[in-house]
Amino acid sequence: MCLFAVLVLANGDLTKTKPNRPQPADVVVWPESTNAVSKVATICYDNNVPMIPFGTGTGLESGVSAPRGGVCLNLTKMDQVLDLHPEDFDVSVQPGVTRNALNSYLRDTGLWFPVDPGADASLCGMAATSASGTNAVRYGTMRENVMNMEVVLPDGTIINTAGKDRRTKKTAAGYNLTNIYVGSEGTLGIITKTTLRLYGIPETIMAAVCSFPSVQAAVDTTVMTMQSGIPIARIEFLDDVMMDACNKFGGLDYPVAPTLFLEFHGSEKNVADQAEAVAEIAQMNEGSDFQMASDPAQRKKLWSARHNAWYAGLALKPGSKGCATDVCVPISRLPEVIVETKEDISKSSLIGPIVGHVGDGNFHSLLIIDPDDPAQIEEAHVLHERMARRALAVGGTCTGEHGIGLGKRHLLREEMGEGTFNVMKALKHALDPKNIMNPEKVIPV
Amino acid sequence: MCLFAVLVLANGDLTKTKPNRPQPADVVVWPESTNAVSKVATICYDNNVPMIPFGTGTGLESGVSAPRGGVCLNLTKMDQVLDLHPEDFDVSVQPGVTRNALNSYLRDTGLWFPVDPGADASLCGMAATSASGTNAVRYGTMRENVMNMEVVLPDGTIINTAGKDRRTKKTAAGYNLTNIYVGSEGTLGIITKTTLRLYGIPETIMAAVCSFPSVQAAVDTTVMTMQSGIPIARIEFLDDVMMDACNKFGGLDYPVAPTLFLEFHGSEKNVADQAEAVAEIAQMNEGSDFQMASDPAQRKKLWSARHNAWYAGLALKPGSKGCATDVCVPISRLPEVIVETKEDISKSSLIGPIVGHVGDGNFHSLLIIDPDDPAQIEEAHVLHERMARRALAVGGTCTGEHGIGLGKRHLLREEMGEGTFNVMKALKHALDPKNIMNPEKVIPV
């Protein structure tokens, strides 16, 4: 069985009136090499059997569900870090290597990989789903940080998206296949190696927390910070509902108000300058005084509310599950979309604390539901669709970082329009002509 | 006739023993709207007529040549800047808008678009060719700076690669079509609008020049600067041959030695800190004292050698043409590849001054040739192929920023390997089934 632990319900499950565990594959295999993956693919291709790649199963959009059965390729045994080039700031990893495992491996090199979706996800899985998270505002998403990938095509052919062993900072050589497979959610091939950009571990990291009288004030502070060109590393928004949950969960006493959690990376001097500049901006927007920390233990404590936010949200109703929504809008439209979403949730019977990677215009509401109550599931579904369409109406997207999976296929179609959707379909057909790669996901054929 | 002025020979021309002007199309049309482009495409599609999009014709790889005749779509009359959103740092432009035209338009907003390939190219053309240039080390290439594109498909269908009017900083919605069309060199569709990321104009810009006893010392300074995480905006390398040419061309008296031209962007304090840090690194590598300037006129003077480098190179032999080569390698391999390339050129009868965007591992040799001498053309061709293969041998690419066009198709195949090349072919076939979009370029079908 190819099941996995999830703290939140995948949105795909909301298309049904009763939530289900993800549908299992018929068979799970644990290949230990790219050649083994290729052999499995060849057999599946010859026999028209669906394949579902599995990294860590931490995705939120039913990416590893197997609605048409088939073979789940559990890639956790391919767990080697390969070809570290510290002088060039790049490394290659197999799909069993997680984010934390890579950063542990790199500890003595002074380098790190910053993309951080929260979960300790497989890096190849993060590439497959175009993951991002809290550091993306400074370091970019997987799209900007994958240099090359080894991919096993549905028929078993092994390719390297930028050519074998190529690892240049830039290239103009032919079609950008790397960025076709980044974000393809396993529907075009199986990623068996990813070459990643690395960064120097910052000399100093400073964390700060600041609360605000309104959502608008917090977001205005974010917008002005971005406009000032301050290279802030993280700027995370928690709404009053989430802050209340965090206080209760962690025995904290933060004001129950819209709050920004900030992090600055750089030299000691540079970090102090950045913090001072943002503190000034926050004051202009009636923010509280900054609580700051640069000592690792104190930083951890200061950010514990943010780090535990999902758990704190779920703890509001013991036994509940959460539906993780995920929209992204142009930053100037963020206050109105968050405020309207909060109003919409407050009119429902559900609680929906909000966290946002506001520097990117991306936010999530965690809709807390009783998994045995069809009415609540339906209510979450309706709120979630309205939230997505609210984002679409202002030039936004129905997914900033979680992907399409099963539950957002109709929203993808609305977001793209028929012509663009058809190009995606043509692409899927060209690269997976038998429709056996993670079928039903992203683009139903 | 769809001809254009070129200062250098396109590499496509080197596949012949005698250089030719680019082959003209049969017809040139000047559409004034996306709908007009769509109508032209529909007619061409119905009649199997090739289409060649034309922006400014400043590309270096024969992108606007028409080896199979057909219709050239000259897009210069579609020259409107559309939908500026200063608060979101984005703007949309039609294909007639050049880089300088956009930056003039933006002057009073405090914003700019930094990608700078040298020529005053069409921004949609820059998207089509995945252009980059001197600022890419800090701001990225077109790949990182295009948010959305309107594209007319070969059959006349109008799509928006990220959905109509979408302009989010990030998205995980479906296949990344934007980055398929960025760098597609007109072979998949006609770009009729591009939405770009903008940046705040830096408060202070400081320029600096520093010469070194060896290529290794100059590149080591670059590598150490990058490793230190200094957010340098430009770091350009000119070799001794190019410095000699610049001195002669501009009446300058720089040391005839490997030289770095640097630029720092930020607050006054921050820029001074960056310059100080790099000066220290340069000293460790036996670099000369920095010549520095922050006043615009003085900066321009200091950088004039770099800005005029191509002209200075060509002036070494009046009446000559230049063959612009373009490779990119992992930065740690840069010294050996540059040194070997210099040795190779020095053994030939040609002069080949070198400039490099060394922070990205990208460099060019401008091989100076007599366009009427087949032996020199052949010699340049051989040097150019060896240079590309030298890059390929160390994990590099045959093109960092100029693209594939006509002259590098065989190198693309070597670089990618057969499997990857076949995926590119499948993509071309899926999106241009009649092979009428800029045929023969990139992927010969």
Image (cartoon, coloured by chain):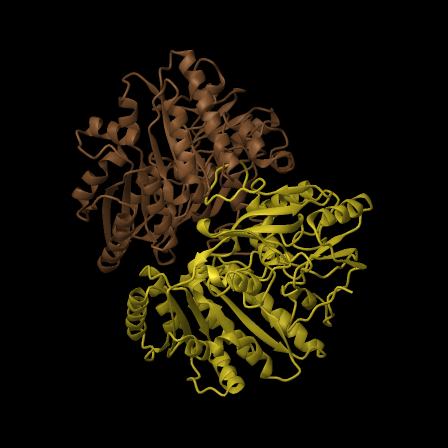
Chain colours: A brown, B yellow
Picture residue at 42% right of the left edge, 44% below the top: A141
Residue A77 visible in the current orientation? no
Residue A347 position by quadrant:
top left
Residue in view at x 55 percent, y 48 percent:
A176
Q: Position of residue A19 (x, y in %)?
A: 43, 16
Residue B44 screen position, x and y as percent: 79, 48
Relative side of B178 to B205, left or right: right
Numbered-mark total:
0
Q: Is residue A147 above or below residue A407?
A: below
In-front residue for pair A247/B254: A247
Judge whether B212 appears above or below A184 on screen. Answer: below
- Identify the image quadrant of the C terminus of chain A: top right
Picture quadrant where residue B406 is located:
bottom right
Picture coordinates of residue B53 (x, y %)?
69, 56
Quarter placement of the N terminus of chain A:
top left
> In percent of the image, x 45 and y 16: which residue is there?
A378
User: Is residue B65 shown left or right of residue A250?
Assistant: right
Toward the viewer: A346 or A234? A346
Q: Is residue B390 left or right of residue A202?
A: right
Q: Between residues B40 and B129, which one lies in front from this camera angle?
A: B40
- Asked if one can make out residue B136 in the rendered structure from this viewpoint, the answer is yes
